[in-house]
Amino acid sequence: MTAIDQVFQRDRGRQIQRQAPLLQERERYLAHVLDLGVSKEWVRTEASTLLHVIRLMELDRMRPVTIAEIQEASQRWMADPKIHLTRRVGPTSVESFKQIALKWFRIHNAIWPPVPTTPFDIYLAQFLSFSLGNPCAGV
């Protein structure tokens, strides 16, 4: 049974998830989150949010993204009236969107520049950002 089958009981929800781009990447992430013991309700929320991430970032394949791109997508998500039909935007909506997107891209090593984990990584990221003219200098 796939992660989508585990968290979506209705056929319509499963169909929407299966027809969206990056199915394998989303399945891998959702299975990982389920293995961590996250509730099916929250995993369903994350799965739905990932569809918005894909749409707003115009993804048809996994590619490296910057933190700034994720931030811009979260702002577009907040302003999109089609998304917030049943619920109003809450004080943590943007942060939830960003965190879900970050976790998904991070599990696929698709954050650019890579998130530093050691002091050396920080210096290397700063050097690469400077030498490549990357707008995420110092991230």
Image: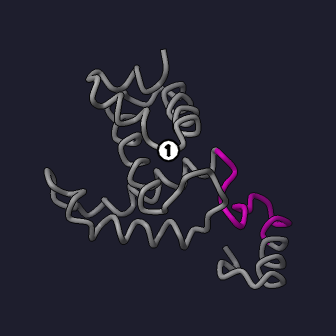
Is 79 situated above or below 22? below
**Which quarter of the picture shows residue 9?**
top left
**Residue that label 1 marks:** 21
Along the horizontal axis of the image, is 92 left or right of 128?
left
Above or below 34: residue 49? below
- The number of numbered discs placed on residues in the rendered structure image is 1
Question: Along the horizontal axis of the image, is 111 left or right of 38?
Answer: right
Q: Residue at x 67, y 60 (%)?
A: 64
* 68 within the magenta span: no
Q: Is residue 116 magenta?
A: yes
Q: Residue furthest top?
A: 1
Residue 98 on image: x %, y %: 45, 60
- Residue 42, compared with residue 85, is above or below; it is above
Label 1 crowd bin: few (<14), some (14–19), many (20+), radius 10 Å: some
**In the foreground, 52 or 66:** 52
- Depth check, front residue: 93 or 80: 80
Q: Residue at x 55, y 49 (%)?
A: 103
Q: Position of residue 11 (x, y in %)?
A: 29, 23
Which image quadrant: the C terminus?
bottom right
Q: How is the image coloured?
A: one colour
Q: Quadrant of residue 68?
A: bottom right
Characterize the magenta stretch by its predominant secondary structure.
loop
Please state if 123 lies on the left or on the right of 107 as rendered. right
Q: Is residue 41 above or below residue 128?
A: above
Disc 1 on helix, strand or loop? loop
Residue 50 at x, y percent in the picture:
43, 48
**Residue at left offset 50%, top offset 44%:** 21
| Relative horizontal placement of residue 68, taking residue 128 as reference (left or right) | left
Amino acid bearing label 1: Pro
Region rendered in magenta: 108-122
In percent of width and height, residue 38 lies at 43, 31
